[in-house]
Image: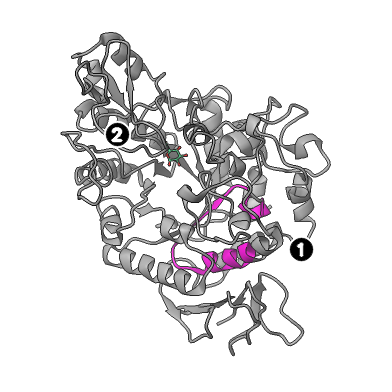
């Protein structure tokens, strides 16, 4: 077993490697085809050996699972399909003993339509105090038959649903996810209580779902393209909410990571001021095509936007919402764009895997913290889910055009020779595993020094034990076109060749790690990255 992983105890989050667990698909301990906390507890050694500092669990609360758990019916209870609160507490403690901290996912923008508050609101009727916690409105049109405004949905489709008594309620996502009214003091109080509840159970941090969407224009005015501020994205009121959250977190030494998708770097950085969120996801890097110039610009912009507020950058290549990295990099369009997802996109997986290996070394060498999504360390591709098995509402709300996000949520392969690759028992998992999944199984990769898993393990080991990685400055080195080369102050050099031809290694120290073999002349081939000693 590896030694405890955290190499820093204070401000651990400034350069942590954080592993995202999607509990439904990680490991199935009770053999019912759905992943659960028993499965995670049994697989903690995998995470310790990989060498991660923390685990972020996507929502594990009671939920009808209309949106994979992002429709929460009760924020203080673990979904019985996953286990119990007692088990979650054990898991948090056991992980901590292995040096792994826990981050939970809080979904403040909306609740499930099965949440007690929403049920009470439906029952209490128009004009009631219960409805004020949500956005209920009469409709427009002669008989109120038109929605109160024209806001576009975060998923395709409408943002308003009409209830039997004629009122409409707002939902930026599915109708089963009614939006809360963040101008209501009870909504604020309740969420601060929920934060305390989880901090008291030993969690070290909280990921904030849809963090820039909570506050709405009080007039609920129509959306006008190009007119600022947007009626529901990045409203100024949010900062006051997060300042009070920060006071709660500080009492426990807890940290936040916000899910903030904003194109404007300056607006993004406002969430990271010293009395607000500690970190936020950097989706600019995730969306960036495999192109040296664009990546360099994304890295520079990211570092420049974080510097004035003193926050560390975060780097993420994939998560439970986006196309898996090896697939994305194996396509003609290597960037990520929700609007461009389509069935049957031609993919060169061998090329994508080569690039994903190089991207892993690039990402892990950058200043700040890194998020890994379960299965990324196994190099899993995006799976094609047969249409009749798709569960993601994004697919249905697009009228069947968007393949949805299930392809990156397929249950993990652990044991290449076991039924369903050792995900659980002989019960078929909730999403089908594609053919050839066994080749990606963790046990097979552990035995293969050339595997993606071996690369990640070694990279994380070096990142932990070599001075200069993690938080701190980065200096670009001169490099040919299409090549990224930088040095970490007092530490290693990273070179990534995104050009079509091999390049000479710069005259630096010994090779610490390469993402693929050097050529016979000792040059760095195309789509390959190397770490060199300072
Ligand atoms: C976030 C989650 C996504 C979910 C949405 C609504 O974007 O990452 O999975 O569907 O919020 O809660």
**171, above or below 383, in the image:** above
Mark 2 vs 1, N-terminal side: 2
| Magenta-span inclusion, residue 518 | no
Figure quarter occupied by ligand 1: top left
Q: Where residue 449 is drawn, which disc sits there?
A: 1
Badge 2 marks a residue whose secondary structure is: helix
What is the distance, in whole Å, between disc 2 and disc 1 at their CAs? 47 Å
Q: Hey, which quadrant is residue 146 in on the image?
A: top left
Residue named by callout 2:
192
Residue shown at 62%/75% (left/top)? 530
Q: Hey, which quadrant is residue 266 in on the image?
A: bottom left
Residue 263 appears in the figure? yes
**339, above or below 33, in the image:** below
Viewer-side label of 2, 1: 1
Residue 432, horizontal then vertical, whole percent:
69, 35
Estimate how packed mark 1 is, as few (under 14), some (14 to 19) or many (20 or more) residues with alpha carbons within 10 Å. few
Residue 15, horizontal then vertical, whole percent:
46, 61
- Farthest left residue in view: 219
Estimate how packed mark 2 is, as few (under 14), some (14 to 19) or many (20 or more) residues with alpha carbons within 10 Å. some
């Amino acid at each position: 077993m590896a030694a405890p992983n955290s190499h820093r105890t204070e401000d651990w989050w400034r350069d942590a490697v954080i592993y995202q667990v999607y509990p439904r698909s990680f490991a199935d301990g009770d053999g019912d085809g759905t992943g659960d906390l028993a499965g995670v507890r049994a697989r903690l050694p995998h995470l310790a050996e990989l060498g991660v500092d923390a685990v972020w669990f996507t929502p594990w609360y009671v939920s009808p699972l209309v949106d994979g758990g992002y429709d929460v019916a009760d924020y203080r209870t673990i979904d019985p399909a996953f286990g119990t609160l007692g088990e979650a507490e054990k898991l948090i403690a056991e992980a901590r003993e292995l040096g792994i901290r826990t981050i939970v996912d809080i979904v403040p923008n909306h609740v499930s339509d099965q949440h007690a508050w929403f049920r009470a609101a439906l029952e209490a009727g128009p004009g009631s105090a219960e409805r004020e916690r949500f956005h209920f409105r009469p409709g427009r049109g002669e008989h109120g038959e038109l929605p109160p405004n024209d806001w576009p949905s975060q998923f395709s489709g409408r943002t308003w649903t009409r209830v039997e008594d004629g009122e409409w309620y707002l939902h930026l996502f599915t109708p089963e996810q009614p939006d809360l009214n963040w101008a209501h003091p009870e909504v604020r109080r309740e969420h601060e209580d929920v934060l305390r509840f989880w901090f008291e159970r030993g969690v070290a941090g909280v990921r904030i779902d849809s963090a820039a969407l909570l506050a709405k224009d009080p007039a609920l005015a129509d959306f006008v393209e190009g007119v600022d501020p947007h009626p529901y994205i990045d409203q100024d009121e949010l900062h006051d909410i997060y300042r009070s959250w920060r006071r709660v977190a500080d009492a426990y030494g807890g940290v936040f990571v916000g899910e903030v998708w904003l194109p404007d770097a300056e607006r993004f950085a406002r969430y990271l001021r010293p009395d607000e969120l500690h970190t936020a996801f950097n989706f600019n890097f995730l969306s960036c095509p495999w192109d040296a110039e664009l990546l360099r610009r994304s890295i520079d912009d990211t570092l420049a936007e974080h510097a004035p507020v003193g926050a560390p950058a975060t780097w993420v290549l994939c998560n439970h919402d986006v196309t898996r990295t090896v697939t994305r990099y194996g396509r003609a369009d290597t960037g990520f764009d929700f609007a461009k997802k389509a069935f049957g996109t031609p993919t060169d997986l061998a090329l994508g895997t080569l690039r994903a290996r190089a991207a892993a070394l690039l990402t892990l060498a950058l200043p700040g913290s890194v998020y890994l999504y379960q299965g990324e360390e196994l190099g899993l591709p995006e799976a094609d889910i047969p249409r009749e098995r798709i569960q993601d509402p994004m697919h249905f709300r697009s009228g069947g055009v968007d393949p949805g996000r299930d392809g990156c949520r397929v249950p993990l392969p652990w044991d290449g020779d076991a039924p369903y690759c050792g995900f659980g028992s002989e019960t078929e998992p909730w999403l089908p595993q594609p053919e050839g999944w066994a080749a990606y199984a963790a046990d097979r990769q552990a035995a293969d020094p050339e595997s993606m898993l071996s690369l990640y393990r070694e990279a994380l080991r070096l990142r932990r034990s070599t001075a200069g990685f993690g938080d701190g400055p980065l200096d670009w080195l001169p490099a040919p076109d299409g090549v990224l080369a930088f040095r970490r102050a007092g530490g290693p050099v990273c070179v990534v060749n995104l050009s079509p031809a091999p390049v000479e290694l710069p005259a630096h120290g010994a090779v610490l790690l390469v993402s693929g073999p050097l050529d016979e002349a000792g040059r760095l081939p195309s789509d390959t990255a190397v770490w060199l000693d300072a």
